[in-house]
Amino acid sequence: MEPISLTGTVLLLPLASALVIMLFHGLLKNVAHLVSTGVSIIMFGCALIFLGAEDQPNGLLLYEYLKVGTFTADIGFVVDTQSRGMLFIVTFIGMLVHIYSLGYMKDDDARARYFGALSLFMFSMNGIVLADNLVMMFIFWELVGVSSYLLIGHWFKKPEAADAAKKAFLTNRVGDFGFMAGILILFGLTGHVSIAQLQGSMESGALNHIRDNYEWIITLAGLGLFLGAMGKSAQAPLHVWLPDAMEGPTPVSALIHAATMVAAGVYMLVRVYFIIGASHVTGDIIAWIGGITALMAALMATQQSDIKKILAYSTLSQLGYMVMAVGLGGPKEGMFHLYTHAFFKAMLFLGSGAVIYACHHEQNIWKMGGLYKKMPVTFWTFAIGTAALMGVPLMAGFWSKEGILAVAYPEHGHGNGILFGMAVLTATLTAFYMTRLVVVAFFGKARGKDADHAHEAPLVMILPLVVLAFPSVLAGYHFLAEPLQALVPNHHEGAGAKVVMGCSLVAVIVGFLAATRLYRNADKDPVNIPLFANKFYIDEFYAGLVKYGQDRFAWLVTALERIFVDGLTVRLPAALASGLGSWMRGLQSGSLQAYTFVLGLGIVVVVYLAVFFSTKP
Amino acid sequence: MSPLSLELGLGLLGLVLLLVESFASVPRKLIAYAAIGGLLAALAVIVSGAAGSVPDSLKEFYVVDPLALFYKGFAIIATLATIILSLEYAPIIHQFVATHPERTKEAGLGEFYSLPLFVCVGMMVMASAVDLITIFVALELVTVSFYVLVAFMRRSAASLEAGVKYLILGALSTGLLVYGMSWLYGMTGELSLSGVAYKLAHWEGNSAPILFAVGLMLAGLAFKVGAVPFHIWIPDVYQGAPTPVTAFLSVGSKAAGFVVLTRIVGTFLTPGSVVAGPVIQILLILGGATILLGNLAAIAQTNFKRLLGYSSIAHAGYLLVALACIHTGGLKMTSGEVAAFYLATYLPMTFVCFLILSAMRAKGYGEDIASLKGLGRANPTLGLALAIALASLAGLPLTAGFMGKFFVIFATVLEGYYTYLAIAVIGAATGFFYYFKVILAVYSKPDGPSEGPTPDLGLLSKVSLAVFVAAILVVGVYPDLIRFALVK
């Protein structure tokens, strides 16, 4: 197949599926899930073929979307290693999540709506991956926001879910504002939005000139784009929506809030890396925000008791890793971690879904325990995922984490000792909290009757776990990474490499040992750090900000508005106008004689104006 | 085919229908349908471009240019809408016409359906008239037909009162107009507008008599279009006249006045004309005063029909200002075309309001704004249509009304008439206040607990309602639809 028809299919098929399901919701009640899943399988097939497509330096044009003068914004596709690899990940995980959802959402009343939204999400995500210009990317960016909103709020009758959906949407708005500002700055500087053209301009064109003379503008544009990525990839301080988003169905958490949508921010940063890399300030800020997010989220994860929340904070932490790598001048390292992380984190989420399913929607790990015997497949796959996430040597996560640590190591071009230390600490904490999760949930004795009666999940749910176990182990090796078109970072050599390797190993061992010691046979959490359990009180801080800052400001603004806007500029003229109006109404007496008199007066005035009052107007 | 034959044909159709009304006992609805059919056929001829031209010998009196064709089409559509509206309003006409309403079923209705045809003929001739006599005769054909229509409900005191007021004040204004015309003829010796224009451009000597004539003529025409202070008849006549006639007056009669005004002002403002300065001055002052008074006085209205009357006054103000802005090259339209565009947007929104008013009236509701309460719930379609029409009258973006106002305001900017720009903006802002008050009523709960009958429309009215609402929305985003028809 031609690349254009492949990408066209990948983009339009899920749209068709979403539209059909949403329009004929009632009619397709019993087949919608099959339609959507079938579409996801076809998409995956297309993505596989697409892996062999040739690079297209000029992109592929599907449809000329917007044309004003010489400015164009098209629906066009970029074909390079990055897009091919990412499309594979998105469609692969997407397909597995569709299949898994067949089991997980079997008894849901609104299953058709769920699968419709899932198709819409696939459409939007594919659009981001394939976008060859920033306007198209922004459009699909927003569409991803919408479908995420729909999916988080799938159980909208639960107030928490509705609130979480709203929170995710609003928080993302803040980021999107920055994204748009960034796009507008670049558009203002160059007059186009195509990524290829912008890159060309950065190499030898207007942007190049501007970078040499006014670097701050480029910094500003880069930071704007990064703000967009901060929203989608949940970087501090815009991370608050992601843990709450766990109110959505678990397969959604796996697809959107672990493997794909949240990765979109990193993907976008790597796409526009030529802008970010052009300014040191941008890179530094990005690296620091990524590092802080990674460490802070890891700290919070150590004190959570909800299985999905732990994974959510872990996701935050890993996203912070990726962002830090990009900021430190390692876009390939960031993308490589995105690629490995997608597999094992999706698997962990799906595994947690199986656990939750088995325990009748119990999510508190302190009410689980002893599940390894009852759910062997889930346990083993979960253990593999955990090992991969911890960075146990030879697992997928090991290679990619290694790469990031190497970028952060002071010997590397942009490396930074403090960030390196933070990254190692994060790795230690990761090993710690993941071991804690596995030990508490799967070992010991059952601490609740739901856990006591738990049994293995059905085959459609197990199957994706098993499938994902393979890349979780093998994705880091060249024989798999190369055909899947992952951006494999260059191997780091030198004295630093050994130090990095050593730190990484020590981190895993320390974290693992500490957690096993602390949590083996524990019935309740022996450690209690309210600061971490309460997520550094950031939500409370925001609430306070709204309450004491925004509300008071709003009060002041209202008062000013009442006096000046409402009073002086609206009510006063309105009163004047009504007064005049009533007076004019009074002129309309109904008496014909009076009317004739007015008419005569009018004639006199007009004739006077005409004959005697002839100045230019 | 000459467009003149369209006018003759429609006039003949009107006569035949009057005869049928008198001597044959056919269902009166058929008369309306025949009129509608004739009008549709004429519209088809005009739209298809088959109207052709007139022999050279007539060109002194009668031209066929895009503006003329546009106004002819406008006249036909307005007449069509009026007849459809009349079908809706028939029960009330009948009630106030027949001596024994319960015995005679359709007394007087046939006449009511066929008279608008004569107005239409007058308007169509006027659209092409470029000669003082032709203009005057056509204008009087319109006005005289309207005298009859306004006073048509002879058993309603309000209708009769409106008729008398309109007749007397109308006669006064006609007198002014003819007096002005005769002065103009006396001074220039010309009846054709082109001749007058040539004389004005090469005038030597005292210009006071010419200016006197110009003043009188403008005053007379200001009456027809309802400009301050010659608007004085409008509220009473609009309120008293049968609703379809009110609609026809506010759209048709106004358009008739403006087509004449466009031609005559165009003559006065011919390059090098001695009267150009004062004419622009008068147009602007009248226009500004009209915008202010129309909008301000509308605020205090409680009767919806009367509100629409003031609204029509306010819109006339914008039209006058539009005519005064002659340097509109930036808009790629002449000032006359800006005015024509404005009128074309004004037609659908006004007719939608009157259609719904008729529907309410036919179900026994009053004409107060308060009686619209609950419409949004009782008949959401009508409620929404009315809301859209009112939003368009106010000039909400994405509606046709916005585009009309936009062009006028743009024209004032191009001319640098900042005072009038301010007035236009103040007027528009005021408009939002009182139009949205009506929308608020549409969507608020009815005062009483009793649920009245649900207002509804007949099929023809529904179709025209849909067409008008669609036109409001389409022109609101794609104004070129009308501009193409205008600027060939």
Image: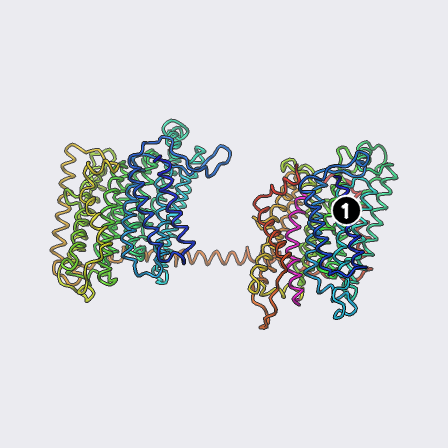
Where does residue A591 sit, x and y in percent of width and height?
Answer: 80, 62
From the viewer's perspective, tell me whether residue B443 is left or right of residue A317: right
Q: Residue under mark 1: which chain is it in? A: B
From the viewer's perspective, tell me whether residue B463 is left or right of residue A6: right
The one of B201 and B342 positioned closer to us in this rendering: B342
From the viewer's perspective, tell me whether residue A204 is left or right of residue B220: left
* Residue A608 in view: yes
From the viewer's perspective, tell me whether residue A292 is left or right of residue B462: left
Residue A593 sits in quarter:
bottom right
The one of B25 and B204 positioned closer to us in this rendering: B25
Where does residue A568 sit, x and y in percent of width and height?
Answer: 58, 56
Badge 1 is on which residue? Answer: B9
Colour scheme shown: rainbow
Residue B342 lies within the magenta run: yes
A533 versus B476 height, above or below: below
- Of all residues shown, which one is farthest toward the bottom? B449
Label the magenta part by its dominant secondary structure: helix
Where does residue B199 sit, x and y in percent of width and height?
Answer: 82, 33
- Of all residues shown, which one is farthest toward the top? A204
Disc 1 element: helix
Residue interval drawn in magenta: B338-365
The one of B252 and A235 positioned closer to us in this rendering: B252
- Image quarter in which the N terminus of chain A is found: top left
* Residue A289 in view: no
Where does residue B243 sit, x and y in percent of width and height?
Answer: 71, 59
A461 versus A279 height, above or below: below
Residue B114 sits in quarter:
bottom right
Residue B344 lies within the magenta run: yes
